[in-house]
Image (cartoon, helix red, strand yellow):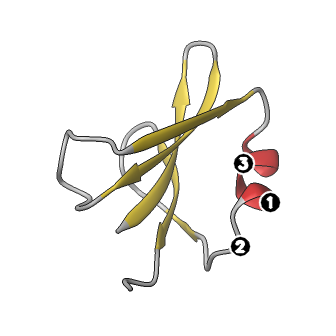
Amino acid sequence: MYAVIIRTKRGYELQYKDDLASENVTGKEYSSNDEILKRSLTADWQESNEENVLWVAKLIDN
């Protein structure tokens, strides 16, 4: 599972996805500040080169 933080017209969105290429999102959180979203989930965040995707983190699979 992956967590991604994307930029939207209204702010920032933290999305949970099974696969980075997938359009399916299993959960979302919203904020006006991407740093707040990063702090809401303890993960090894990496900057992304994808359009509108600011941060990506691979989550531990159980």
Residue 1 - label: none
Horizontal side of residue 22 vs 5, given as left or right: left
Residue at image position (61%, 80%) is 44
**Label 1 near label 2: C-beta < 8 Å?**
no
Q: Residues within 10 Å of mark 3 (few under 14, many from 20)?
A: some
Query: Which residue is outermost to the left?
Result: 22
> Disc 1 designates what residue?
39
Q: Secondary structure at mark 1?
A: helix
Residue at image position (76%, 56%) is 40
Query: Which of 28 and 11 lies nearest the eye of the viewer?
Result: 28
Picture coordinates of residue 23 (x, y %)? 20, 39
Picture coordinates of residue 29 (x, y %)? 61, 37
Horizontal side of residue 26 vs 45, given as left or right: left
Q: Earlier in the sequence, mark 2 or mark 3?
A: 3
* Quadrant in which residue 19 is drawn: bottom left
Alpha carbon separation for disc pair 2 and 3:
10 Å
Instruction: Indicate the amino acid at tag 2.
Output: Thr
Q: Quadrant of the N terminus?
A: bottom left
Query: Which residue is outermost to the front?
Result: 62
> Disc 3 designates what residue?
37
Instruction: Indicate the amino acid at tag 1.
Output: Arg
Residue 42 - label: 2
